[in-house]
Amino acid sequence: VAEKRVTLDDVARLAGVSRATASRAISGAGPVSESVRQRVAQIANEIGFSPNQAARALASSRAHAVALVIPEPNSLVFGDPFLGGLITGVFEVFHDTDYQLVLVIMRPDEAPIKAGRFLQASYVDGAIVVSHHSHNRPELAEEQQPIPMVYVGRPWHMKTTMFVDVDNVRGGQLATQRLIDRGARQIACIAGPADMTPVCDRVEGWQAALKQAGLEPGPLAHGEFTRHGGAEAMTKLLAMSDSIDAVFAQSDLMAAGAIEVLQAGGYSVGDDLLIISMDDSEVARTTMPRLSSVTNPAAELAYRASRMLLRVIDDNVLPVDIRPEMLEPKLVLRESA
Amino acid sequence: VAEKRVTLDDVARLAGVSRATASRAISGAGPVSESVRQRVAQIANEIGFSPNQAARALASSRAHAVALVIPEPNSLVFGDPFLGGLITGVFEVFHDTDYQLVLVIMRPDEAPIKAGRFLQASYVDGAIVVSHHSHNRPELAEEQQPIPMVYVGRPWHMKTTMFVDVDNVRGGQLATQRLIDRGARQIACIAGPADMTPVCDRVEGWQAALKQAGLEPGPLAHGEFTRHGGAEAMTKLLAMSDSIDAVFAQSDLMAAGAIEVLQAGGYSVGDDLLIISMDDSEVARTTMPRLSSVTNPAAELAYRASRMLLRVIDDNVLPVDIRPEMLEPKLVLRESA
DNA sequence: TTGTAGGCGTTATCAG
DNA sequence: CTGATAACGCCTACAA
């Protein structure tokens, strides 16, 4: 377990070249003759050399790693299909690069200092931040950090243009309009936490669609982006009004929770009462009835965010030259509405 | 974005002490007078110093990071409740330590070299490996790596004692016995990939219970540990025999897939045909009917594995002095069997 | 308790 | 194209 590590010196000595040359040959930077490159590669392989990342990072002042920061509790991270798709997508992109992806999950009860310091510690060359709430985590603001940061979901303070998002206002409109088209008159909304921009935007879209149709805004309830949060919100809504005929839920998981409550209450979902959600994840296809849903393209957002970050840290594009990217949501119809 | 980094030298100078003293004060190692410690801390905080991890790692030859290695495709990782619970649990433990957890997801199509080199690159001080298949990934064998490795799930080659697992043979028995007790006579098994020890163990338990009850072994079908894998396996089983009256599915997700197939085929699950699974995750509580399931305590396994690793890398316990830990599975009854 | 000095394994800047 | 040589920022005996 404790054999002496093989270093670049060993490779250089055995290959009969200087350490500098061996370094160039292995890192692929700088000019090296083809014969030397091959010999060095051969030897490195034989003796099982792998460059010490710490030394490399120290000397080059590049960590060859990026962080994916999620300021949410663990259980939420691994239960939510949107976050799952996002994480998967980001991993997918960085698998094909030289960067190691480090998943940083911040608990709400955790001192801001830990993640803040992490980002400042030359541990990573850049970061992607998702699910950003407003009030907490000031250390996640771009101007606080020495490394480039890309946000998934429009940040509250628009000092940065480095973000990707789906057009959530439009998403809320699309969903609500569908309910209106199906003849619903009192349309409620199950929203996520009120301190996230996507949540506010979707509420705005919901209100806009209702207004345009000349309908009164229905009741609104906020909750966590979980099955349980959706169930609780639905319970609240039923207590607020007894004439709801449709619900716009802001995530598939919340809709699934709401459906359970509705069915327990004797409603026939998709019939007495319509429901439509947002995400269009796997979950939308496994509820009964299956959910009509507005897309929230996790994989595409992940791809765009990753590319955006790589443009800055790899291709030296300046952050000020980056334009935000906005994706169009689409309506996917199934049995629930 | 590009201000000069503040280093330990800056702190030392401003505090009027040597770099060595500043280092001791900040890392908390070695003797420092209380007054100096406070002054240094104060200054460090004022000028926003955070130690460069690369330099620290290089000098101390400790990365202050550990890896959680999962040799499965992304989609499987973020869809499976057992893996989700495991990851969550491991994060939970390391949140409270000084170690940064790095999640390493290996794709099947990925060159072994990438992960292997990663583990050798002094990137991490230890690793936890889960979901280990037999044929692939020789680089995940402990003797191949210079760092301590703990396995979740008994490894194929028993050269190491550093593993934690649930008693899968017992789990298979418990599940199958329940079906027998309910009066089932032809009991099929939906198993995970045949190259994983937990899968083989559960099959063994299934067979043992049947044999002891004097029943013929029912049909067996392998598949991926996914909803889809379970559905496919169930389809195969139905083609193999038309008198199955119960199924032991090796994961909740597989059982959920199987249920869909059965219901589409007109079976009344929990009535005509009993089904029982293993994991006892959230999924078991959201299928219709809800699943009877044998526990596979992800959080507890995560906790034990993490502690085991910490004993070796933090408390200098020798790997040879580590005993494997085996958890007892329990039967949880619901409507499906 | 504190300071001095050497080294951790690479990369990068120069000459040659 | 190659080889010295100096960083990179911190830790850690060792000596004071």
Image (cartoon, coloured by chain):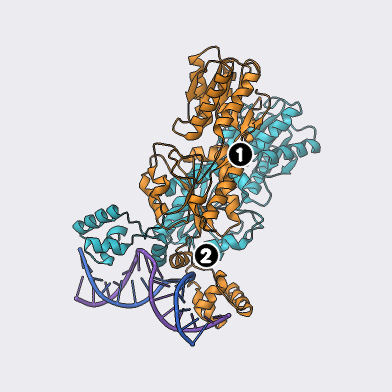
Chain colours: A orange, B cyan, C blue, D purple
Residue type of the residue flagged with mark 2: Gln
Q: Residue at x 67, y 40 (%)?
A: B212
x, y percent for residue B73? 63, 49
Mark 1 — residue?
Answer: A297
Q: Residues within 10 Å of mark 1 (few under 14, many from 20)?
A: many
Q: Is residue B147 left or right of residue B141?
A: left
Mark 2 — residue?
Answer: B120
x, y percent for residue B36? 21, 59
x, y percent for residue B181? 65, 30
Q: Which mark is residue A219?
A: none
Residue type of the residue flagged with mark 1: Pro
Q: Residue at x 38, y 40 (%)?
A: A109
Letter of the chain that mark 2 sits on in the rendering = B
Q: Residues within 10 Å of mark 2 (few under 14, many from 20)?
A: many
- The residue nearer to you, when weighing A99 against A321, is A321
Measured along the vertical axis of the image, is residue B157 above or below residue A20? above
Q: Is residue B268 left or right of residue A154?
A: right
Determine whether the residue tagged by mark 1 lies in a helix, strand or loop.
loop
Determine whether the residue tagged by mark 2 lies in a helix, strand or loop.
helix
Which-is-in-front pick, marks 1 and 2?
Answer: 1
